[in-house]
Image (tube, helix red, strand yellow):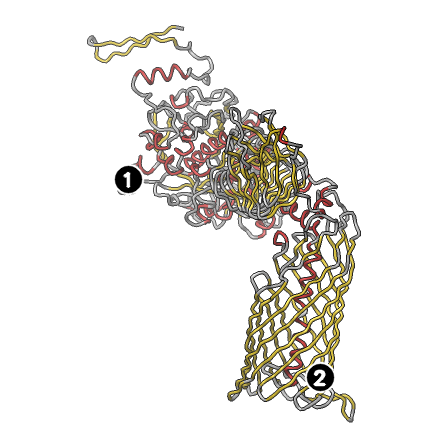
Amino acid sequence: MHTSIRLRLAAGVFALCVSWDIPAPLADPLQPLPSDFVAGVLDLFGMGDVPGPSDNPLDFLTDEYHSSWFLEHIDAAEAYARGYTGKDIVVGVLDTGLDVTHPEFQGRVSPFSYSFADFSRDVSDRNHHGTHVAGIIGAARNGRGMMGVAYDATIMALKNDKELTTMNALLSYAGMHGVDVVNVSASIGFNAPKPYGSNNVILDTAVVPLQLAPLAYAAMEQAADKDIVMVFSAGNDYQDQPLLAAHPSGHGLLPLVTPENTRKNIYAFLDVDATKDIANPNTYVYVSRADPRVARLDWSDLEGSLISVVATDRNGDLASYSNGCGLAWRWCLAAPGGDAPTSQQTAEDAAILSTEPGGGYKVRRGTSQAAPVVAGGIAVLRQAFPYMTARQVIELALTTTQKSGRQRDFGRGKFDLGRAIQGPQTFGAKGFPMDFDVDTRGYDSLWEGDIGGPGGLVKRGAGNLTLTGNSYYKGDTRVFGGTVSIDGTITSPVAVSHGATLRGTGAVFGTVTLAGTLDPGPSTGNAVGEFFVTKTLLALPNASFVIDVAGGEHDKINVLQNAVILGGVLHVRIQEGTVPAKAPMTIITANSSYGKFDRIETSGLPDSLEPVVTYGKGLVLAFKSKDDGSPGTVEGGDKPAVLQDMVEGGSDGVVQQSSSTASQSVHSAGGEIHADVTSGMIEEGRHLRSATMMRLNAAFDGVGDPETAFMAYGPGGIEPVAASSEKLVFWGDAFGAMGRSTGGADDGVLKHATAGFAMGADAPVSDQWRFGVLAGFSRSTYRDKVRGSRAESWNYHAGAYAGARWGALLLRGGLVASLHDVVTHRRAAPGTGFTAGATARYAGRGLQGFGELGYRFDAQNVSVEPFAGLAHSRLWTDDYREAGDAALSGRASRFETTFASLGVKAAIETVVVDRPARFSAMAGWRSAFGEARPGVPDPAGGPAFSVPGARVTDNALLLGLGADLDFGERASLRLTYNGVVAARMREHSLSARLGVQF
């Protein structure tokens, strides 16, 4: 239809006629005017001056942007500069309707908009509320008035008649018609009463309407099942009902409903049917917490499917009217909602400007204005991350907030679209799954921010996910599909499954376990680059490496610890238009490397050349002419047999769990537990030395000796005697300790415990010398959860000792032989192809000699004894052959080391509560010489290769404390503490001995 538009500026003076093709009168008021028509009219009258696309956030800071000051508070320009504006995202506005003729919405009103007030498609807004809310969400960026957060989003107006049943039907309707985000400002049938006149009652708790809330819960469940992000206003109740307003009202309160919170009276259930006037608290009828209708209600599963929004003012403080987040903080955040103006503000400065029915604009304030700020931001995020589920987008919004203020007010913090658009900030935040498990569904995506938290990342599906931040999350990164490109850094292990790819030019400060592809270089294209791994790179048999070569430039993998290659493919890709240099190029650097590739493939390589890989400390690639001699594509690099045995059963499953599980698979298969037991038995020999030295210390009145009764044969049989008695003296001592040490392959943590006893008899053989013999038994346990290994050792000891004293000079020493009966258990890690693990039993023999020289000083009631000690230990273990489908065997081994110690003992005798008391202390330093880390040789005839165990501590601090307290002539108490503290080992023992004579 051709229509003329006539504008008269002054009668008879000037007339402007514009002729335009416009649509015929619309039979359906929801049918929008064509966007090109609206834009043409706006341009004609100078109202359409909108800057073009830009990747600079500053270019979006126009007058229109500043008029919408809430955009500044959420840093929306950062999202716009990345090209995200909510385009193609449908936002349902469950409210009082929408002025669909307003220029701010032209061309972006969903044809599925619907009124449940009269069950028609007439969603006209006679109230203003819905149009104002919709403008905050999605008013156009057209150079006039203001603009919404998601200015390219589609608005679906869902008109509500304020009846709860209608509102629930609208939520269901939204789920059936493709809504991505829904904004709700309505209650669930209960509004906080105004305290005035006879109704002047301040409620002391939140209220849940019994008959209405279950209907809202059911509708919210249905919307959550449709993958809709639900955004609710938290309520404007503070000025009328400050106690009730501690938590969100309405929908935001429902996830708090649990049996436990019902018992705690966090809220009260209102019997709506029995209440005469829901606006008058004096008529309220509450339901008992024990009532079976409410006692077992649990709606906590709603957590993670919604966001409740409190309001802030222009200064970022909680608005004067707004509810707080309270106990709902885990699904609650804050956003600009405006407030009443201060003396220095205008209404436009303080409140939120948005669209009004009739084509105009007006300022308003409330959590109804705050919620659409978040709903619009969610629309932008759903465009930016279309592969994320609703729950993941909610997690993204709630965990990227600006942290400020009290949690009970602001919940997770202030909504920050500028940070959220950069991707996740935290994995494993409270209230969310420990792993961010995302399927990119064929989309390429960029996460720019630094990521922390206790959780990890799981990547599934096709598509390239690029991480550019310096991330420090503690959980594993597991790649089951597509590509993960690390162009920044991460500090935890990475595991890549078969069919998946790891790319990038960044660094992994952890172990990389590879069953898929490692392709160094930028996240897009085939340009060359370097990739860094600071711990072990483990390539399983079906892994592949892609190395790009462009002339003299090439990809490079830098491994700071070990590179273990158990087969797989090296694919050398020559860049188009380049000729590879013949000079050797190092493609993998490592502190040490094991294994080799099964085959080498090439693309783009001239037929006259072939690749040659040399294996050594790293891997060197070179190209030679085929007529230079016989092919030599692989040189050196046998696989460690102990690892080869592990992978023959199929190894892709190693990365189906986590990289820590993969590490467990390899290191458990290596049999470190056998080496760990060796170092443990060497370390725990000190308990026999300590028991022997304590006896000799007491016999020669050394410093710190215990006031313990010793036994001897007398005329009347066995009787107590002094420690220095000239008779044949019998003694006994029980000992025990617990500790942990590290330092085996991949730095597993070995927890160990020992308990046992020693007994002996000695007698003087001269005025200075005393000689004795001893026997003992102990049991030791070792457990390494990382490697899934444990062991037990039953230890039998026998020895001789001697000591002497010449004045203040004391000499003590001994020789102890031990027999060890060792049983080991290694659990099969998931996915290794093994089921039963492996067990072994074998014997060991130990011999240790030790001596100590001390010199005693006395001054009144204080004694001090500096000392120096030397001990040499040697341990032999037999061959072992494990039983089980993951069995290994090992050759006999010998390990020996020497310990030297220096220290000082001190004791003081005093009186405590009129009873004699004695306190002692010891501090010393011990150093080990010789072999520091035992190893188990690989018995399979491979290259020189042994599995290292936990280290014998090179240097350690020795500590001791003691207290002897007498409670009378027949009762005494002795408390002792002994400890060994080192960088990689801790061991502590505490004992209490109560002696009573009858």
- Residue at the extreme bottom: 715
Label 2: few (<14), some (14–19) or many (≥20) C-alpha neighbours in 10 Å = some
Q: Within the image, what quadrant is residue 964 found in?
A: bottom right
Q: Is residue 680 above or below residue 560?
A: below
Label 1: few (<14), some (14–19) or many (≥20) C-alpha neighbours in 10 Å = few
Helix, strand or loop under label 1: loop
Q: What residue appears at the point 59 percent right and 68 percent down from the top-left corner?
A: 980
Tell me if 813 is positioned left or right of 252 in this view: right
Q: What residue appears at the point 44 percent right and 13 percent down from the top-left corner?
A: 26
Q: Position of residue 767 (x, y in %)?
A: 67, 91
Q: What residue appears at the point 39 percent right and 10 percent down from the top-left corner?
A: 22
Mark 1 residue type:
Gln
Which of marks 1 and 2 precedes in the sequence? 1
Q: Which residue is mark 2?
A: 771
Mark 2 residue type:
Phe
- Residue at the extreme left: 13
Q: What residue appears at the point 63 percent right and 53 percent down from the top-left corner?
A: 745
Q: Position of residue 144 (x, y in %)?
A: 33, 25
Please name which of the two marks, 2 or 1, marks the residue nearer to the observer.
Answer: 2
Q: Quadrant of the N terminus?
A: top left
- Disc assigned to residue 345: 1
Tell me if 553 is positioned left or right of 679 in this view: left
Given residues 892 and 735, the one toward you in this image is: 892
Given residues 352 and 775, the one toward you in this image is: 775
Answer yes or no: is residue 430 visible.
no
Q: Position of residue 563 (x, y in %)?
A: 61, 44
Q: Is residue 415 above or below residue 362?
A: below
- Residue at the extreme front: 628
Helix, strand or loop under label 2: strand
Q: Within the image, what quadrant is residue 210 found in?
A: top right
- Disc assigned to residue 228: none
